[in-house]
Image (cartoon, helix red, strand yellow):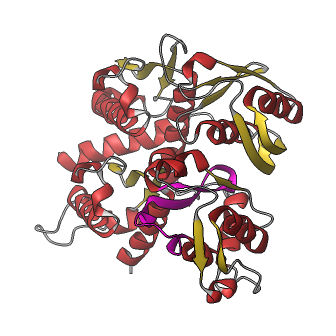
Amino acid sequence: MRKSRVSHVTLALVCAIAALPVTAAPPKPVTLDLTAVPLADAIARWEKAAGAKADVAWPTFERIDKNTPVTLRLKDVPADAALRLLMRAAHGGGKTNVWRDGDTVRVTGLADAEVVKPVERTYDLVKSGVGALIQADGDTALELVQRLIMEMVAAETWREAGGAVGGMRIAGRSLVVSTTPVIHDEVAALLGKVRDAAAERPAPAEPAVERTRRALARRLPGTGPTGTMTLGEALDKWHAAAAPGVNVIVDWRVLETGGFERSSPVDIPKDAATKPAGEALAAIFRSIKSDFKDFLGVEIGEAGVLVVSSRDDLERAMAHVRCYNVRALVARPARRGDDPTQAERMEAVIKALSEAVDPPSWRDNGGSIGAMRSLGTVLVINQTPANHERIAAALARFGK
């Protein structure tokens, strides 16, 4: 009886999520070259390059205004991503919401119900062919999806968790969600990822991300920075030698809070000039004359942009959800009566991952970033880009 109920829920979720619409094509790429340009003028240049109108809700940004200087160089980055990166460069981390409203691109700092009015959308998780299954197990299936969304998407905004913006209720065979347009996009994206993982479709290729990874793995040609110089000079020379075709952002506003400035002295060892680019960048960080070297971090972010900032900022800003189909690990048929069930195998995989990959980061271990939940044979995980790489490697080891 237990096995039948679990299989009904799993099949209902897979079939229902498969019926959701696919994501629209990405917007056109833009190129920006800004040096200490006032933010309002920088946005005007973005509008010209993107062929779009940006409407910025200035009161929602606490630390910036129209005159905040922006220094940023981006080449061939999708328009909406470029606008988010532009705003990030202005206020040094922080949350920027960017979404399309007809021909206008709306930009806000906070998910504030007083500024960004919530809209209600209905997510029909039942389509023809699964009605009978949902009728039998629908409440359980819908509650599973509801809990997943509230934990993985803007968790702090849902009223059920003490937030002020989001609300969600079950209505018959649908979920009715009230939240901001940006969070609606994230809800749809999450369900699409679950759908693709359940169908064992590979995640869409990200050429820009792969290009950045290849650049970091390439050995420098002997022209990398060495010797005594400033941190700003070292990063500029590293970029020119290691990855001239890769977009790089250094969040100086965030780094300054840890005592690191463009003028901070570094003394880089000679062998860094011929190391792989990623190792050479780590050597620059290690050569800083400071007791707080671990403050610095680097991650590959949206559109393959390499972001240098504080570790804490990168964890908050770049954690995202990926879905992993672990059917091969958990769905083996039981051969004896005392063999573990699929649910027990899934719990074992979750426990092994939480112990093998950055244990302090998981919310269940007291961390603030990592979250991991299962739907059928799909693991839905929120983590940093680096930890997602470790998760994929760990799952590959588990399967051997």
What residue lies at 40% left-to-right and 22% top-to-bottom? 173
Image quadrant in which you'd find residue 164: top left
Name the residue furthest left. Answer: 338
Q: Position of residue 279 (x, y in %)?
A: 58, 78
Q: Is residue 276 above or below residue 379?
A: below
Question: Where, quadrant-wise, is the N terminus in this rendering?
Answer: top left
What residue lies at 72% left-to-right and 79% top-to-bottom? 224
Q: Position of residue 61 (x, y in %)?
A: 56, 24
What residue lies at 58% left-to-right and 16% top-to-bottom? 59
| Residue in the foreground of this view, choosing between 121 and 315 | 315
| Residue in the foreground of this view, choosing between 130 and 304 | 304
Q: Is residue 193 magenta?
A: no
Q: Is residue 298 above or below residue 373?
A: below
Q: What range of the chain is rendered magenta?
A: 285-310
Question: Where, quadrant-wise, is the C terminus in this rendering?
Answer: bottom left
Q: Please state the total of marks drawn on the protein image.
A: 0
Q: Position of residue 194 (x, y in %)?
A: 48, 46
